[in-house]
Amino acid sequence: MAKLSVVILNWNGRHHLERYLHSVVAHTTGDAEVVVVDNGSTDDSVAWLKRNYPDVRVVCLDKNYGFAGGYNRGLKSIDTPYTLLLNSDVEVTEGWWQPLVAILDSEADVAVVAPKLRAAAEREMFEYAGASGGFIDYLGYPFCRGRILSSVERDEGQYDTRRDIFWASGAAMCCRREAFDALGGFDEEFFAHMEEIDLQWRMQLSGWRIVIEPRAVVYHLGGGTLPPSPQKIYLNHRNNLAMLYKCSTPLQRAVVAIVRPFTDALEAVGYLVMLQPRKAWAIVRAWGSFIAWHGRLHRARRAIKRRKRAVGIYHFSIVLRYLCGLRHFNNMM
C-alpha cells in the first residue's frame, strides 16, 4: 500500500489536467499514488483521464460539492496515512513530495506540511495563494511570506527557512490523515475559500503544528492576480467572518466585531465608487449570511477543543502597515 496519495480535485478542468497532470504523474513515483476526485464534472474530464491516464485512479462524485465537500467525500475512498491535496493547475518538480513526507514521518505533532509556491506564469515570483507559508493578522486578513495583500515578491531565497506557519495553501498541502479525520475535515458549509485556513486553525487549537518546507517547490497557475468575482468576494468575506467567530479568542472576536464592519463598509463603498455595485452587494450578502449562521457557529465554537493557542497571528493590521508602505513580509514580522 502506498504511504502517500496525491489527490487532485477536478471540476470541468480537462484543460488544466492536459497541461499539468503529466508533471504530477512523472514526479510522483515510488511510495506514492495519484488520485483524481471528480466533483461532478459535466465536461469530458473523466473520459479523457481514463483514455490517457488509465493508471490514475479516479473517484467520481455525483455533483459539485465545492472544494470542502469534494475533498471530504473523495478522501473517504482513500486510506493512505498521508494525503497531499493538489490543485489541478499545479506543476510539480522532481523530488517534490519526499521532503514533505519526511517531516510527517519524523515529527509526530505536524498535521500539515506544504511546499513553496511559485507562480507558473512568472516562475521567479512567489505565487499569490500561498508563497512560502501563510499567516493572518488580528482582523483576519491572510498574508504570506512573499505576499502582502496584492504585493507579491520575487523569490530570492529570502524565505527558504523551514518554520511553523499559520496556514498552508489548499493549492498544495500534505496532510496527516489522522489529524484531518479527527477534526472532521473541512467545514463543508464553506463550500470554497478559507476552508483550509479554518481547518488548520482548528488543528493548531487541538495541539497540531503546520509547517512550510521551502526545499519542496511547485508552480501554481492560480487566480489570485485576477480581479475577484462577486461570488468569490462573497465566499471569502462570509467564510472569513465565520472562521474568526469559531476559532478566535474572546478578545480578538470583540476587536473584529468592532473594527471589521467599518473596514468592510469602506471596501464596499470603494466598489461603489468604482461602479461595481455587484461586488459591494457581495460584502453585504456575506454579512447577512454570517449573521444567519450565528447559531450554528456558536455550537461549532463550543465544540472546538482548545488545548493550545495557534501561532502566526499578527497582532496588528496588515492593511494599515500596507498603507504605510510596508509591503514585504520581513517588514511585518
Image: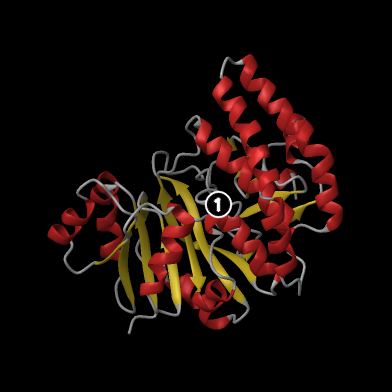
Circle 1 residue: 190
Q: Position of residue 297 (x, y in %)?
A: 69, 56
Give residue 55's quadrant in the image.
bottom left
Picture residue at 50% right of the left edge, 51% below the top: 191
Question: Compared with residue 122, is residue 109 higher up or lower down, i.e. above or below?
Answer: below
Question: Compared with residue 78, is residue 254 higher up or lower down, i.e. above or below?
Answer: above
Picture residue at 57% right of the left edge, 75% below the top: 179
Q: Position of residue 310 (x, y in %)?
A: 73, 64
Give residue 292's quadrant in the image.
top right
| Residue 95 showing in the rendered view | no
The residue closer to the viewer here, 99 or 34, is: 34
The quadrant the N terminus occupies is: bottom left
Q: Position of residue 13 (x, y in %)?
A: 30, 47
Image side of residue 90 versus residue 282, left or right: left
The residue closer to the viewer here, 28 or 123, is: 28
Amino acid carrying label 1: it is Phe
